Image: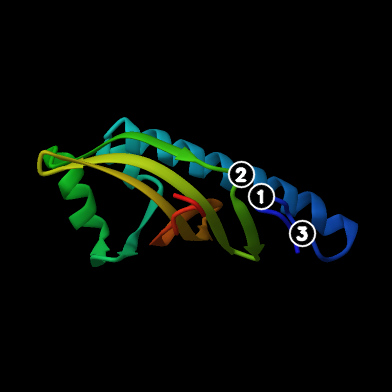
């Protein structure tokens, strides 16, 4: 089994170059998306999402416009978002999954929230561009001894 962030590239060597490019591109997209979230730039955040994007969390399901509305209003801001380790990227044709452990600091309704979460994003490639259609967030278990 691969460690987090390692790419397993099945198939003939000619397919591996494409997989490596997709892996690098998706890793960069996730980094850029995190930067947009910390910048609290709703338009830039939205550029990474497909129109039908939803986020699933312990609170339920939020759609794209609901999430971006919170950012636009200033009710939701982020001051930090960091990957704990390189993401696990898997590409299946024009669909990809990116899973990573993320720590972040958010502010909602005047309260600060520090989170340690596992996230899985599902991306689809349309017209040559990767867009996220689903983000799933799961709180990380506390480390042993904490």
71 relative to 141, above or below = above
Q: Secondary structure at mark 2?
A: loop
Mark 3–mark 2 contact, CB under 8 Å? no
Q: Residue at x 50, y 50 (%)?
A: 101
Q: On the rendered image, what quadrant is the N terminus found in? A: bottom right
Mark 1–mark 2 contact, CB under 8 Å? yes
Q: Residue at x 78, y 59 (%)?
A: 9
Side of 103 where 17 appears, left or right: right
Q: CA distance from mark 3 to mark 1?
A: 10 Å
37 relative to 23, above or below = above
Query: 87 or 11: nearer the eye?
Result: 87
Side of 49 where 76 appears, left or right: left
Q: Secondary structure at mark 3?
A: loop
18 relative to 62, above or below = above
Q: CA distance from mark 3 to mark 2?
A: 14 Å
Query: 25 or 127: nearer the eye?
Result: 25
Q: CA distance from mark 1 to mark 2?
A: 5 Å
Query: 101 or 45: nearer the eye?
Result: 101
Q: Residue at x 53, y 42 (%)?
A: 84
**Residue 50: x %, y % from top left:** 38, 57
Task: Write down the residue under mark 1.
Answer: 5
Q: Which mark is residue 8?
A: 3
Q: Which mark is residue 86?
A: 2
**Residue 82: x %, y % from top left:** 46, 37
Q: Give the color scheme: rainbow, by chain, secondary structure or one colour.
A: rainbow
Q: Residue at x 42, y 39 (%)?
A: 34
Q: Residues within 10 Å of mark 1 (few under 14, many from 20)?
A: some
């Amino acid at each position: 089994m691969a460690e987090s962030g390692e790419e397993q590239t099945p198939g003939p060597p000619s397919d591996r170059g494409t997989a490596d490019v997709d892996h690098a591109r998706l890793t960069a997209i996730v980094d850029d998306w995190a930067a947009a979230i910390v910048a609290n730039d709703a338009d830039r955040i939205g550029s990474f999402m497909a129109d039908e994007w939803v986020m699933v969390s312990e609170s339920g399901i939020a759609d794209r416009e609901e999430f971006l509305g919170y950012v636009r209003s200033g009710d939701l801001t982020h001051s930090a978002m960091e990957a704990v380790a390189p993401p696990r990227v898997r590409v299946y044709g024009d669909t990809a999954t990116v899973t990573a452990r993320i720590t972040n600091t958010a502010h909602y309704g005047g309260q600060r929230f520090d989170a340690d979460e596992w996230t899985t994003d599902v991306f689809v490639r349309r017209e040559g561009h990767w867009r996220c259609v689903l983000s799933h967030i799961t709180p990380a278990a506390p480390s042993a001894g904490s």
